[in-house]
Amino acid sequence: MECHEGATMIKTFRGLIADGGQDTIVLHTNDGSTGYRIVNFRAIPRDIGTSSIEGIFQIFKIPQSTVPTSSATVDFNDNTLLGVAVCRGSTDVGAYGTDDHVIFDNEIFNQDIYITYTDNQGANPGNYYIELEQVKLDLSENTVATLKDIRNETAVALG
């Protein structure tokens, strides 16, 4: 979807998630003609410099039945995974936090997405920021995106 003179429409979302938590970003529409692509995904600890953190944020196309509170696994073979962000921080003097992220920017989706969070160092909450590019889908693109979502949900349900 475009706005003024060819500029793309960017929607932003941010949140704070507790360890083992999951947020839902509501994106679905009645006709499915609006798609989205992730253009930016960042993470930062809530308590900078006061606690050790190794936070792992993951964006999925389907809700996760359980979110671990330690030792999260990142699996790039999971076709429901849209992106990952890792933030690290420490109370040690001279140890600075880092933010690493990977997004699969070729993935276009038209349904809700789910952000999970795990802290491998403790039970610290973490902040995320996400930018989504809004894309107008024609009928065939709409059908493909919707069928992918249905297939992912069915595959998980069948286990």
Image (cartoon, rainbow, N blue to C red):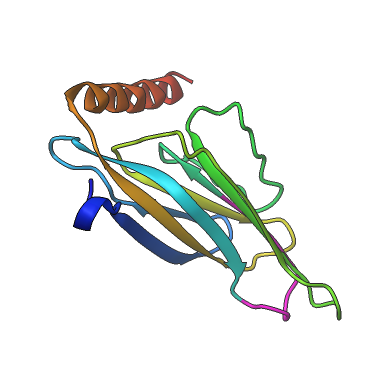
The image shows residue 38, relative to residue 79, as above or below, that is below
Q: Residue at x 19, y 29 (%)?
A: 138
148 falls in the magenta region: no
Depth check, front residue: 129 or 3: 3
Q: Residue at x 67, y 78 (%)?
A: 48
Q: What are the residue bounds of the magenta stretch?
A: 47-57
Q: Decide if residue 17 is on the left or right side of residue 77.
A: left
Image spot of residue 16 (x, y percent): 48, 67
Q: Quadrant of residue 72?
A: top right
Q: Quadrant of residue 28?
A: top left
55 falls in the magenta region: yes
Image spot of residue 153 (x, y percent): 37, 27
Q: Decide if residue 135 is on the left or right side of residue 154.
A: left
The image shows residue 85, relative to residue 93, as above or below, that is above
Q: Quadrant of residue 32?
A: top left
Image spot of residue 40 (x, y percent): 49, 54
